[in-house]
Amino acid sequence: MTQYESGTSAQARRFRLGLIINPFAGMGGPAGLKGSDGSDIVAQAQALGQTPRAPDRALRCLQPLAALPIDLYTIGGAMGEAIARAAGFAPVVVQAASEPSTAEDTRRAAKALKQQQVDLILFVGGDGTARDIYAALGDSQPVLGLPSGVKMHSSVYAIVPEAATEIVRAMVAGRLVALDLGEVRDIDEDAFRAGRVQSRYYGELQVPAEPRYIQAVKQGGVESEPLVLDDIAADIREAMEPDTLYIFAPGSTTFAVTEAMGLDATLLGVDVVQNESLVAKDVDAVSLEQRLAAHRGKVVLVVTAIGGQGHVFGRGNQQLSPAVLKRIGRDNIWIIATKTKLEALQGRPLLLDTNDPILDREWAGHIRVITGYRDAVLYPLGMAL
């Protein structure tokens, strides 16, 4: 099982947890105010003797995690720092918060934590907080809601604070953690106070959940490789966007995708696809760098891991030079692998060996791995030593 400690190795990289607390979330519930949105509602709740409940719920989640190898990044004051210290952490404060904090503080905080390359953002609040997180991040960052609000229509929360603890614990331990897209919904509080429930869909957040290893394509507990590869290929094709440049790295898993697209691609080379057409075949590092320099739009790399070893970069795909990888960016790396391949690693991380130690350190951390059709897990990605 992977251990995360400070240092340069994959096994040594500590888990990075982001924390955002909406200190006023849920105050209007006990006061019968049907929500907590707006400074006027918070003031009414305070006038009725209500005190914040979010800090205590955050503390319930965080205290059992303080002894684990976690680096906690958060916001100043009541938006995270105070409770993080009370739970036993020595947090890194990335941003100050206004007093009292606002929805804009939450949005700014989410963006600031993503820039710190945290593995997971834990946010404490209700549907209004989830809306602010979505407005800032979309579905680009794994997050987990710790329920503390009045309105809980969104499916992005742990069921109780202790459930959030267990999910984080599993991620720190390196176990496979499935990624679901959870709906962000909120209701019109004014309508709710008038007796009408008007729920509105705002989007989806990327939310980790308990691992679900057994897929519908499995039979007798054994994953059917051809069927899973077909599912992965279908997921990739559905996600491809016009005019984006897609680079397919070597490997039988990536080859299965290009084969499903009817392309005359290579099994052991690097191929370039645009608008579902093969535009360059078996390219080398120099020509690939030149092509990317000339392309002004988005670039996505589809890559797999070597079975048994777990190498994602640096084994059989040296055409993907550090310059190429930096041009693409970590957020545009699509790693594809069957769950059988991941489970064969027995908790060891996927490996980086890009020939640029600084890049390897920057890219280490949990990353999304596509394992089927609309199915993905978070898995550790780190350095070989």
Image (cartoon, helix red, strand yellow):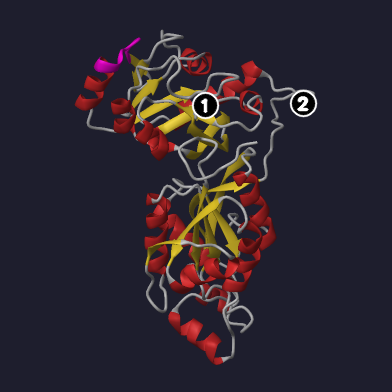
Instruction: Name the spot of residue 44 as percent of width and height, x first.
Output: 52, 88
Name the side, left or right, on which 23 lies relative to 176.
left
Q: At label 1, which amino acid type do we have?
A: Ile
Q: Which residue is mark 2?
A: 221
Q: Residue at x 46, y 26 (%)?
A: 237
Q: Quadrant of residue 213?
A: top right
Does residue 103 show up magenta in the picture?
A: no
Mark 1 crowdedness (10 Å alpha carbons): few <14, some 14-19, many ≥20 = many
Residue farthest to the left, as pictured: 294
Foreground pick, 28 / 303: 303
| Residue segment shown in magenta | 279-286
Q: Quadrant of residue 220?
A: top right
Mark 2 crowdedness (10 Å alpha carbons): few <14, some 14-19, many ≥20 = few
Instruction: Name the spot of residue 226 as percent of width and height, x first.
Output: 62, 16
Q: At label 2, which amino acid type do we have?
A: Gly
Quadrant position of the N terminus in the picture: top right
Q: Which residue is mark 1?
A: 336
**CA separation in Å, label 1 and label 2:** 21 Å
Q: Residue at x 61, y 68 (%)?
A: 59
Q: Is residue 84 above or below residue 357?
A: below
Q: Is residue 153 visible?
A: no
